Image (spheres, rainbow, N blue to C red):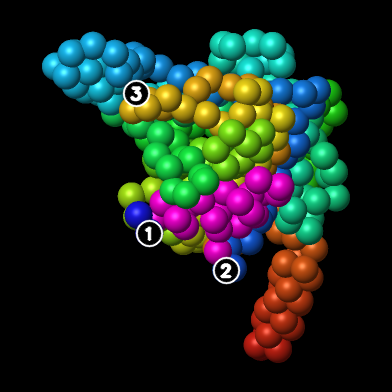
C-alpha cells in the first residue's frame, strides 16, 4: 500500500509536467509530440459480471483477473488504434548537444502489461502496472548533424531504451496522468542507448511521460485493466550522473589539454638531446 500511495503522489505531480523521480536524477533529454494524440493504451482481457449464481460470479471474477492486461504504444495518427512510429521533436539538454535545437524524430514506444495486471487504486488515484517495454527516437531530419567533427545522418539513434516495470497513473476519471519507470523502484530497470551519448557511467535511470487529453479519462472495470484510451504525450529522460558525449573527437577543452601535453613532451625531448 505504501508504494501505491507514493505512485499516486507521483502521478499528481506528473499530471502537469514530466519530472525526475528523485532530486539527484537530472534530465538529459526531452520530447514533445506533433499534431495531437500520439499514444494509445489498449485494454485486453475478459469483462467481469456480477450477475448470476455465486459460482458464476466467482468464475467471472477469476477469468477477468487472469486475463487483465494491455498494451501501450505510439500511434502514427491521432485516430489510429494500432502501433506505429509518430513524428516528434527531440531535444538533448547536454550543453553541447542543446545547440542542435529540437530535432525531428520518429518516436516508437511499445510496452505491455501481461495477463494478471489488474488496475489498482489508492484513494482517488488509479494505477496500471506495466511489465516491460521498449522505445526509440530515430533522427528523421534531412540535414546531417555534426558534433565535434563527427557526422550523424538521418537514421541515427537519438535515444533508445529497454525497460522492465513501470506504471501508468493518475486520478480516477482524469484526462491527465503519467507513465513512469525508475531504477529507484525495486525490480524496475532501464537500459538507455544512443549514438550521441554514453550511459556506461550512469548508475540510476528514470523515464517520465506526461499524459494529457486522455479520451474518456482514466477509468477501469472491476478486476480489469485500465479501459482503452488515446492520449497526447510529452516526456523527459534522466540519469545520475549525466551521460557523456560519445563523439570520437575530443571537445575543445580536451583538445587544449592535449596540445599543451604534446608541447611539454616535445620540450622535454629537446632538453634531453645530447650534442654529437
Q: Is 167 placed above or below 9 here?
A: above
Marks 1 and 2, how far apart in space? Answer: 22 Å
Q: Earlier in the sequence, mark 2 or mark 3?
A: 2
Q: Which residues are magenta?
A: 3-22
Q: Which mark is residue 220?
A: none
Q: Classify mark 2: residues with Cα within 10 Å, few (<14), some (14-19) or many (20+).
A: few
Q: Is 178 placed above or below 36 here?
A: below
| Residue occupying image coordinates x 80% and y 51% | 98
Which quadrant of the view contains residue 35? top right
Q: Nearer the viewer, residue 248 or 260?
A: 248
Q: Which mark is residue 24?
A: 2
Q: Classify mark 1: residues with Cα within 10 Å, few (<14), some (14-19) or many (20+).
A: few
Q: Position of residue 101 (x, y in %)?
A: 85, 43
Q: Nearer the viewer, residue 256 or 115?
A: 115
**Quadrant into which the N terminus falls:** bottom left
Residue 257 as seen in the image, left or right of residue 41 = right
Marks 1 and 3, how far apart in space? Answer: 23 Å
What residue sits right under mark 1 in the picture?
A: 2
In this rendering, does residue 200 appear at all? no
Find numbered disc 1 in the image and state the secondary structure of the residue it sits on. helix
Find numbered disc 3 in the image and state the secondary structure of the residue it sits on. loop
Q: Position of residue 48 (x, y in %)?
A: 33, 18
Find numbered disc 2 in the image and state the secondary structure of the residue it sits on. loop
Task: Tell me how many marks there are.
Answer: 3
Q: Earlier in the sequence, mark 1 or mark 3?
A: 1
Marks 2 and 3, how far apart in space? Answer: 36 Å
Residue 70 as seen in the image, left or right of residue 262 = left
Q: Are marks 1 and 3 in contact (CB under 8 Å)?
A: no
Q: Are marks 2 and 3 in contact (CB under 8 Å)?
A: no
| Residue occupying image coordinates x 46% and y 40% | 127
What residue sits right under mark 3 in the picture?
A: 68
Amino acid at each position: 500500500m505504501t508504494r501505491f500511495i507514493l505512485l499516486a503522489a507521483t502521478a499528481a505531480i506528473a499530471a502537469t509536467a514530466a519530472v525526475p523521480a528523485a532530486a539527484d536524477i537530472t534530465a538529459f533529454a526531452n520530447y514533445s509530440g506533433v499534431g495531437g494524440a500520439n499514444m494509445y493504451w489498449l485494454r485486453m482481457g475478459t469483462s467481469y459480471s456480477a450477475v448470476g449464481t455465486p459460482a458464476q460470479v466467482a468464475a467471472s471474477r477469476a477469468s477477468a483477473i487472469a486475463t487483465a492486461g494491455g498494451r501501450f504504444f505510439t500511434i502514427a495518427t491521432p485516430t489510429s488504434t494500432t502501433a506505429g512510429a509518430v513524428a516528434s521533436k527531440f531535444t538533448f539538454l547536454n550543453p553541447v548537444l542543446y545547440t542542435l535545437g529540437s530535432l525531428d524524430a520518429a518516436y516508437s514506444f511499445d510496452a505491455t502489461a501481461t495477463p494478471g495486471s489488474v488496475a489498482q487504486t489508492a484513494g482517488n488515484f488509479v494505477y496500471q502496472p506495466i511489465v516491460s517495454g521498449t522505445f526509440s527516437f530515430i533522427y528523421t531530419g534531412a540535414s546531417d548533424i555534426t558534433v565535434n567533427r563527427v557526422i550523424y545522418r538521418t537514421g541515427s539513434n537519438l535515444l533508445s531504451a529497454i525497460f522492465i516495470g513501470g506504471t501508468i497513473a493518475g486520478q480516477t476519471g482524469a484526462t491527465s496522468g503519467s507513465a513512469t519507470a525508475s531504477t529507484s523502484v525495486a525490480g524496475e530497470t532501464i537500459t538507455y542507448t544512443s549514438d550521441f551519448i554514453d550511459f556506461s557511467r550512469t548508475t540510476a535511470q528514470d523515464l517520465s511521460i506526461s499524459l494529457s487529453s486522455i479520451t474518456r479519462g482514466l477509468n477501469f472495470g472491476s478486476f480489469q485493466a485500465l479501459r482503452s484510451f488515446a492520449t497526447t504525450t510529452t516526456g523527459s529522460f534522466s540519469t545520475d550522473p549525466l551521460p557523456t558525449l560519445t563523439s570520437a573527437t575530443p571537445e575543445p577543452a580536451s583538445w587544449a589539454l592535449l596540445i599543451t601535453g604534446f608541447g611539454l613532451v616535445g620540450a622535454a625531448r629537446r632538453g634531453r638531446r645530447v650534442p654529437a
